[in-house]
Amino acid sequence: MTKQKVLLSSKEVNIILHRLTSQLIEKHEDFSNTVLIGIQPRGAFLANRIKYLLEDFYNIPNVKLGLLDITFFRDDFRRGDKTLEANTTTIDFIVEDKNVIFIDDVLYTGRSISAALTAMQSFGRPKDIELLTLIDRRFSRHLPIQPNYKGRQVDVINEEKVTVHWAENEGEDTVYLISK
Amino acid sequence: MSELSVKHLLGIKYIQPEDIQLIFKTADHFKEVINRPIKKVPSLRDITIANLFFENSTRTKLSFELAEKRLSADVINFSAAQSSVKKGETLIDTVNNILSMKVDMVVMRHPNPGAGVFLSKHINASIINAGDGAHEHPTQGLLDSYSIRERLGEVGGKNVVIVGDILHSRVALSNIFALQKQGANVKICGPKTLIPKHIEKLGVTVETNLRKALEWADVANMLRIQNERLDIGYFPSTREYTQQYGVTKDLLNSLDKEVVIMHPGPINRGVEITSDVADSDQAIILNQVENGVAIRMAIIYLLASKIK
């Protein structure tokens, strides 16, 4: 039987989002040379939230947000049972010489971010790339990749799963720990 | 659905409507990829593909090769003109020799109808039919539908007329199957000598008057007069064919609607369509070529993901 435990409540998620946004402003100020890239599919929700907070709550106009799909860059093509299904990539600005912030909901093995780094090369050469994640599953990494901004660090064993629910998709902002 | 129902793409006849939708959805993503500054993805870096062309081809071969390279597959090319086929080797022997070099997928064009189906019963690799005689040319059929979908929003419910040499055309048959599986209405138009007997049994209507056909149509797919296949005189002269079945700007302007003009290439300018039609905004001929790469990338990607 699967057991489900709340890791972060809606209120906690909200506080963390404000903190992460403030940390971004501290480093990137007016975002004139900084762009946000949400990693598809689940990073898109978090990236949209951060953009909303930056623009509507902290009055930083015209924050650029792109969505990057990494399906064709993943290293597990033909290794699973199912065909990997792609999502949309929309990056309608130039990333050359920009400070890029990758945004994803959960950092686990680091393979998605590795694929995203490869995928980014198709769009140009950014000045630098940082990583923001809501949940950092430390001790589960397969690659030397660490977040620059993290919401909450959790110690979870491999059999357990962390899922992030968003109000716009699942009706509530909650992070669950699911164990079998 | 996230997986094709087939292991090979031998013809549109053998695939499901859901397969077509999956291919189109995947092609949308690849179309975005091939418009990036760097047009290449590493998905198929461990796949080797053999392009076996037992019959001449320029654009299909280039399009397949480009699609394969943009997916990072390793590619080997083979054309019958410079091969042991001339020395009397059988098709199965030729292909098995190539497969012994650890090839995962075969793209094959062959002058004999059914060559792909025959081969699929004897070898293990995935096969993509790039044209088999006058039978099918499935990737062309799919890219034509994809181009209609791109221009008109959807294929279902649209009236599509295929004009010209239906008898010798593999493009026509694949188009008929593809369009019908998506719910479009298909009409065939051309001289009676170039329309196969009993083609109505496929559920298409036949019209010998081009103007009437165009008045009915949303899309006209103009096929090339394949002089190399016309073994006997099917019509008195090219000039007479053009007068009866050539699309001109005047003819299009005299209709009360805008018909989308397609052509699988290569165009005989001034025969099946005039230059001003081919270069007009109504024609989506070059979009078809661009979409061809995206569609072939999607098909190769989806079939390759089933290779274990």
Image: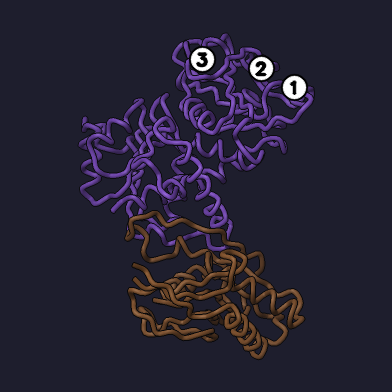
Q: Are marks 3 and 2 in contact (CB under 8 Å)?
A: no
At horizontal 46% and vertical 61% (from top left) the residue drawn is: A71
Chain that appears brown: A
Residue depth check, mark 1 versus mark 3: number of the one nearer the observer:
3
Q: Position of residue B272 (x, y in %)?
A: 62, 24
Q: Please, which chain is the residue tagged with disc 1 on?
A: B
How far is mark 1 from mark 3, CA to CA?
A: 27 Å
Left or right of B216 on screen, residue B43: left
Write down the quadrant of residue B223 in the picture.
top right
Q: Are marks 1 and 2 in contact (CB under 8 Å)?
A: yes
Q: Quadrant of the C terminus of chain A?
A: bottom left
Q: Residues within 10 Å of mark 3 (few under 14, many from 20)?
A: few
Of mark 3 and mark 2, the one earlier in the sequence is 3
- Return the residue nearer the eye: A111 or A42: A42
Above or below, B273 against A53 in this view is above
Give me the disc on residue B210: 2
At horizontal 62% and vertical 85% (from top left) the residue drawn is: A15
The amino acid sitting under disc 1 is Leu
Residue depth check, mark 3 versus mark 2: number of the one nearer the observer:
3
Above or below, B112 against B130 in this view is above
Q: Which residue is mark 1?
A: B251
Of mark 1 and mark 3, the one earlier in the sequence is 3
Q: Residues within 10 Å of mark 1 (few under 14, many from 20)?
A: few
Chain that appears purple: B
Q: Position of residue B26 (x, y in %)?
A: 50, 50
Q: Position of residue A132 (x, y in %)?
A: 55, 81
Residue B268 appearing in the image: no
The amino acid sitting under disc 2 is Leu
Give me the disc on residue B200: 3
- Return the residue nearer the eye: B228 or B250: B250
The figure's colour scheme reads by chain
